[in-house]
Image: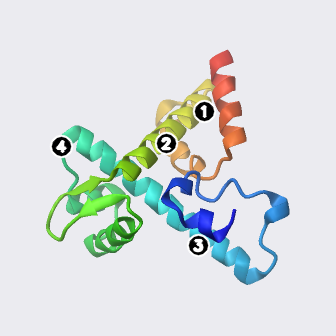
Amino acid sequence: MTKETAESPSSLSPAGSNEKVENAPCSQAERFESVRRAHQSEMAEDYVELIAELIAERGEARPVEIAEHLGVSQPTVTKNLARLKRDGLVIHAPYRSVFLTDEGKELADICRKRHRIVVNFLKALGINEAIAEHDAEGIEHHVSEETLAAFEAFTVKA
């Protein structure tokens, strides 16, 4: 994954997991940069997915609700919303609700689909729903498209 590709909002899902081993960064600094990009992508995915859920439930997503749901401070939410706004994923003005741009909606849809596939796969393995939901939160960001397709194929057969 090139730096240009890694930073475009449409390449945020999954969080850096499509890099091939043969393209892995060589230096320690490059490896750390790759991890930082993956964490930023994971944050973006979590935020847009939550914002979409709040909008669907309540018609809007307020920063205070985002902070409560994610268990972070309001200043952290404000900082991350500024990053998402810069990346073209949200529309947000101070002291106002947050809304998704078309790109943000697209990313949220992708994230929800990935989440659903991982949850269904874990449930097909016999994991109870609560644990499957919890575990899917971590797995969904780090699974390749190939693995995700295998998860989905497995659940169709099951």
Element assignment for label 4 = loop
What residue is pinned by disc 4? 59
Q: Earlier in the sequence, mark 1 or mark 3?
A: 3
Q: Earlier in the sequence, mark 4 or mark 3?
A: 3
Identify the amino acid type marked 1: Leu
Numbered mark located on residue 27 in the image:
none
> Which structural element holds mark 1?
helix
Distance (Cα) linking label 4 and label 1: 31 Å
Q: Which residue: 58% across, 69% down? A: 37
- Labelled disc at residue 110: 2
> Label 3: which residue?
36
In the picture, the disc for residue 122 is 1
First in sequence: mark 2 or mark 1?
A: 2
Task: State the image coordinates of residue 104 (x, y, percent, origin top left).
Answer: 38, 52
* Label 3: how many Cα within 10 Å (few below 14, some 14–19, many 20+): few
The location of residue 153, given as percent across then percent down, is 68, 25
